[in-house]
Amino acid sequence: MASRDIEQGRNVAIVSVAGNSDLMQETGHATQQADHKISKWGAIKENPINFLWCVYGIWALIVIGFDNQAGGLVVSIPEFRKDYGKAFKGGYVIDAQWQSAFSGGPVASSVIGSLAAGYFGDLIGRRWTITAGLSFTFVGVALEFSSDTVQVFFAGKFINGLALGILTTMVLTWVSEVSPLVLRGLMTGLCNVSFCIGPFVAVLIENSVATKTNKWAYRALFVSQWGFGITSVLIAPFMPESPWWLIGKDRDDALKQLRRTNLRRTIITIMPLTIQAMSGVAYISSYGTYYFQLAGISTARSFQIACGAQALSIAGNIGAFLIIDRVGRRPLVLWVFWLSDVTVGLTVFYNFAYNFAIGAVAYAIIAETATSRLRAKSIAISSTIQAALFTMWQFVLPYIFNPNEGNLGARTSFIFGGLSVLCWIYLYFYQPETARRSFEETDEMFLKHVPARKFKGFKTDTEQMGEDALRSKTEILHVEVKAE
């Protein structure tokens, strides 16, 4: 009953204050404060169309996780190594330089895609930039499917990298801007579920066809990727444009404002995806199955283990988004990430710990920390730095653990364990809590230089004005009801 009264009061106030900027601002504060108090289920019932569009955005991201996993899986398929590799000790192996190219090339091209998305997303809008990114995937997959040489296969992977850079940057930006306040953490966190569902489906497919003795042992993987792309690109032209882009498209060039952006805020926006790249996920996700085979596990058994690992990734994500607003961003990334630090050598369990912490929460943090006018460009920069680090790892890792190169094997985990400790120290001192905060509240706390560990309990002027405005509108409504 109370929520209905508040909603009625909101509508009455909006009509009565039209043309009065002060009262309209007060009404805006009241509306924002009411959004703080609504439950997740209430927000879904009030905004069902917005919620469904966010789900569509999450679906469109599945193609990213699928292609990332496929790039590593093909190396672990005996038939692929036979067709594209060379004989080695009774089997076949892909040259380290081509392994690096298959994994690192797409990551390098995703840097171009991310930067292009940041530019074109502000120029032509989020919707058409996402549509263009989805269209690129068809060209890339077609080249991968039809290739007979490593050069053509690499070209397909490279083009797909462009698409993945565009989609990673722009879909996350768009979802954060169309999500209701109380659902923002949930929906941005679910973006990482897409990056786990794609690999899970890829591993399931390969588990059933990897032992075939013809080209379909790996081509089936690329055909399946078209399914996600077709369903996404057909719907993309009808998706609503971001209201934040529509409001800001006539403003001054945001790049001029970038020079004045608080350095602290920029670093906090960049670091979550950087920490992902430094915590070992490139090693586990791209080469986990191949590592099992190097350890003497059969091809069939290694894919079964990979299926279990991806299931744990999804379970970790589900656990994270169920408590991301209740517990907060900072505790999750701080304490559960510590757990992933000590389990980086336990390949299967690492999937759960990583996705329960920094894997899922990173996307909520970068979407909430960046300023509204610079969100697309900030996410593009963050994605670019992450992609650059992934590129470095993808080119270096084959030389570190391959038996015919560095042959470190499982000892590779110690490298990422040490780096993760440094990342944890950064999180403890610099990561603020942004759960259930509006963009305006976050802006205010950064302008006031609130210490990271005090963000959670800080009372902003925006929040106080919202409470006062909501109380005033509620009292006016009750007086009007009594008068009637």
Image (cartoon, helix red, strand yellow):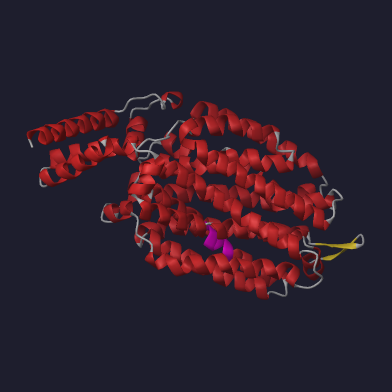
Q: Which residue is rendered at x = 65% and y = 41% of the image?
A: 352
Judged left or right of residue 473, residue 125 is right
Judged left or right of residue 182, residue 92 is right
Up-down relation of residue 314 to residue 342 (above or below): below
Q: Main secondary structure of the magenta part?
A: helix
Judged left or right of residue 315, residue 363 is left
Q: Quadrant of residue 118?
A: bottom left
- State which quarter of the image contains the C terminus: top left
Q: Which residue is at the far left?
A: 483
Q: Which residue is rendered at x = 74% and y = 63% of the image?
A: 208
- State which quarter of the image contains the N terminus: top left
The magenta segment is: 159-165
Please provide percent x and percent y for residue 451: 42, 25
Please provide percent x and percent y for residue 325: 46, 35
Q: Which residue is rendered at x = 32% and y = 32% of the image?
A: 444
Query: Can I make out residue 479 in this image?
Result: yes
Up-down relation of residue 477 to residue 218 (above or below): above
Up-down relation of residue 341 to residue 119 (above or below): above
- Of residue 110 and residue 97, the one placed in the foreground of this image is 110
- Of residue 233 and residue 256, the one placed in the foreground of this image is 233
Total marks in image: 0
- Of residue 434 and residue 473, the one placed in the foreground of this image is 473
Please provide percent x and percent y for residue 40: 40, 41
Judged left or right of residue 340, residue 428 is left
Q: Which residue is rendered at x = 54% and y = 27% of the image?
A: 428
Per the image, is 168 magenta? no
Up-down relation of residue 120 to residue 398 (above or below): below
Q: Quadrant of residue 201?
A: bottom right
Query: Can I make out residue 374 in this image?
Result: no
Please provide percent x and percent y for residue 388: 58, 50
Q: Which residue is at the far right?
A: 90
